[in-house]
Amino acid sequence: MIKLDEKMKGLISRMVPLGAPIADNEDEIDYSFAMEYQGPPVTYDLPRAVPIDIKRIPTASVVAPTSLSDKMLLPVVQPILIPDSVSKDQLKETALVSECVVVSPTSVIAFEKRVRDGNECGLSSEFSSLGTSRFSNGLDQSCELSDMVDSSGGLGFRDGQECSGELSHTGSSSDRLGTSNCKVHECSAVLGLSDGHECSGDFSHIGSSSGTLGISSDKGQSGEIRSSEILGSLEDCEENVDFLNDTDPQDWVSSELSSQFLSSAESSFKAEDSSNLPLTRGKKTAIVKFRDVKSGDIVHEDNSGVEPETKVKKGLCYRCQKGNRFTEKEVCIVCNAKYCSNCVLRAMGSMPEGRKCVTCIGYPVDELKRKGLGKCSRILKRLLSELEIRQIMEAEKLCEANQLQAEYVYVNRQQLSQDELVCLQSCPNPPTKLKPGRYWYDKVSGLWGKEGQKPCKIISPHLNVGGPIMADASNGNTLVFMNNREITKVELRMFQLAGVQCAGNPHFWVDEEGSYQEEGQKNIKGNLWSKAGMKLVCAVLSLPIPNKAANFSGEELINQVNGALPDYRKGMLQKLLLVGYNGSGTSTIFKQAKILYKSDPFSEEECENIKLTIQSNVYKYLGILLEGRERFEEEILKEIRSKRLLDQPDASGICEEGDNKTIYSIGTRLKSFSDWLLKVMVSGNLEAIFPAATREYAPLVEELWKDAAIQETFNRRSELQTLSGVASYFLERVVDISMADYEPTNTDILYAEGLTSSNGLACMDFSFPLSSHDDNIDASAQHEQYLRYQLIRVHTRGLGENCKWLEMFEDVGMTIFCVSLSDYDQFCDDGSGVLINRMDASRRFFESVITHPVFEEMDFLLILNKFDLLEDKIERVPLTICDWFHDFNPVASRSRSNSDSSISTGAPALAQLAFHYIAVKFKKHFASLTGRKLYVSMANGLESSSVDDALRYSREILKWDEERANFSASEYSIYSTEASNSA
Ligand SMILES: Nc1nc2c(ncn2[C@@H]2O[C@H](COP(=O)(O)OP(=O)(O)OP(=O)(O)O)[C@@H](O)[C@H]2O)c(=O)[nH]1
Ligand SMILES: [Mg+2]
């Protein structure tokens, strides 16, 4: 019998349950623990620690990368609620309890156990831990969790009872090391890792079912632990093995950590200073992923979302429990917890996924809050810098965790996979504003609708998403089938109005183009969309029509941002609609955008078509000039004749040598070529020249162009209504252009007319590359190069009467309206044979676009284009020639403008004043019709930098718009959406 000395007794007393008797003799106790053996060599095998190969220790893969900026206020406190059922006494009994949060970018905990006999073992079990984890507490002390070995091999905590946990396992964690409340006594949990599971990712689940590892901060208050201090090091562990030898465990816990761990399946509480305790929402961070060792599959925890919030008195901050309902608060987009401005940064940390409590990171957003994603509140604006806000809001909108969850979307009764969702959202013509729900999709025609309802959109066809379509997908009851789906009554009505025979319960096959045929028959019966009035019919019946802009085949939809962009962002497009009255310069701006933002703006095939267009345009211009020359010649000759009649021999314009020769006369050879050319053109038989003979005639064309008579005619081009200003550019180079190997340059393409498709629709996807101005700019500017835009250009004729088809563009973010500044002295046919001023015509078109119901909330950017032509013209032709501009008074404007500090010193040029005047005219007109604000930008469509500026301005406006919305979306915002008053 060996008597235990006092020291040993003291040691044991700290390890047994409180109040448990301590035996006097060693034989009477069933506790034992390992001590260094210093006796003679033994003849039998000793259990030995198996060394761990560090490289083989799995390290966590970061599930949700967090950026731990310097400014990040770490850690985030896990608030704890004291359950009503727990009395103060009970709290006392539990001794010291701690709670805290550890956030760590890298933390490795490695354990290895070796149990000698596989039975229950006490502290004497041979057990070695080769792992160490260090955690710093709020006071920057560090503790070492190296070897709190327990009897049954669970790492961590021992209460003298058998532990049931088994730690046969190596685990590692990186990034967030969970939050926890662990209980030392009665602990039957192993630390973190259950047998048979491999842990990768963040620790969120360490301990028993409810527990996660926690390290207390000093004095039992909520811990704040700096991430950088948290280390797990295998190297260190050797020094730290077996604290029993040199460390008193109780001291270890109580002095170094000043706390103990407590865990219980239901609740966690804190003993000290409980009145000051923050509230907890019983929630765990679900970032840890366990992998089944055998199958390698990820074992899903119950990740059904965030547990219901603990009721917090309305108006109180969820962290400090102070404030009232008027206190400004920020709301977690996952769990709705609200934090006051003092607590929000602590509760939300660096917000790598936007406004989420730290414990909500990785969780999907509350779908009701999706609309508000990326819209900043006033409270954050006050607390953070503009750059930080921008980054947080971007992250909130774009981070993976916040994207629509594939599992909430069903297509043809099949839950989507993440890949399918990405495929759906990034197709050229995706469903608009996709929300969680059940949808049907006809892959053949592209029709898309909510389950049980008629179709609401035609999206890109042939997408590999969802299951096969069901006959009852749209709940039709017509006995008429289309691509295996029984159509609804309205669709049947549409078929009938399209003249499709529907007798005898037919089954139609309709493809994405609208071509339809009956089942079992080979021939195509017709095309739904090509039938006259179909679009109107569909509009009336609220049925979708194909989105030409998105499916337009002439303009490719290249994803320029390619692999650099995560998949889920590929689907996110800001659409910009570009419209303008005929000749305002929309197609020039569109082409400029292509040249500016696309690395390979025009395909070979496009270039070939462009070449033919340019060559034929040259003849068109020449034809106009020749006709004009004839007209001018005739006019002069007429004049001469009448003057002769009046006996006025010195009539002007007549050359001295010949009676019938005028400055508009050409030689006989050129005259006969000209006559032939005009005849060919009138007959519409241009093939005689073009394209085969273009080269042959090129020298003659050049000669003609250089002829004085044609040059005189060209000088009077303003009298030739249809002659484009770019005619001279091409005619000067007619010989080059007529060559077989002519390849249009970008400038040629830019100047070339008639390149857009017959329906006047073109669209392109692009991103704004970093500009020279962006070079020194912050990360957010860098980030913007990945944001994607779609420029959709539509011709007036593509919009139908009263701009009916504008409704196809309801999802655009902004409309850019283009007006030609040089239109003020020009006239055009108003459609009924009456000549009207082109500026007036432009204004009328502007009115019908801005007042279109679909654009009620739309931002408009007015591009006042062709500023170069205005400069050129304004000195010659007064602006007041246009009735609408009758009160333009440059003198008055000049004096007014000079007093305006926004205009630089010196008298602004007349064209500049005219521009400002016209801009204000449009702004006022816009405000009177819509009550909103119009943005205006000046441009010269032929100058790339000017178009770049104008389009980047549209991007700025979209950003402001967002920021304005952020203000107004704030819970207690006092800002109105009219906050901005710039430009
Ligand atoms: N000088 C000058 N010419 C321009 C400018 N912008 C466009 N143009 C020319 O104006 C003409 C009409 O421009 P477009 O871009 O074809 O105009 P649009 O809006 O497409 O008009 P439609 O072709 O009728 O639909 C073309 O000859 C362009 O080269 C400009 O800023 N300055
Ligand atoms: Mg055009």
Image: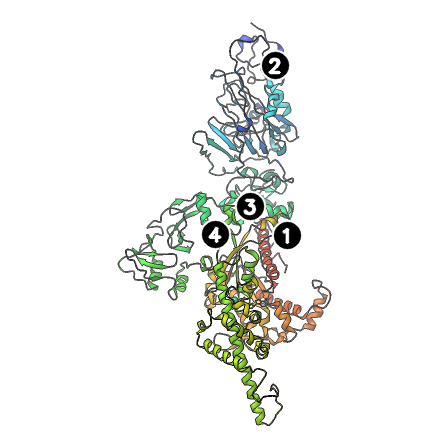
Q: State the CA–CA distance, disc 2 to disc 1.
A: 69 Å
Which color mode does the image show?
Answer: rainbow
Three-letter amino acid code at the position of disc 3 = Glu
Asked if 776 appears above or below 791 in the picture, the reply is: above
Asked if 122 appears above or below 234 in the picture, the reply is: above
Which marked residue is nearer to the observer: mark 4 or mark 1?
1
Element under label 4?
A: loop
Crowd tier of the residue under label 1, counting other residues whose Cα lies within 10 Å: few below 14, some 14–19, many 20 or above: some
Residue 795 visible in the snapshot: no
Name the residue: 33% across, 64% down: 499
First in sequence: mark 3 or mark 1? Answer: 3
Q: Which residue is mark 1?
A: 774
Disc marking residue 10: 2
Residue 176 vs residue 276, the one in the foreground: 176
Quadrant of the drawing holding the C terminus: bottom right
Element under label 2?
A: helix
Q: Which residue is mark 3?
A: 396
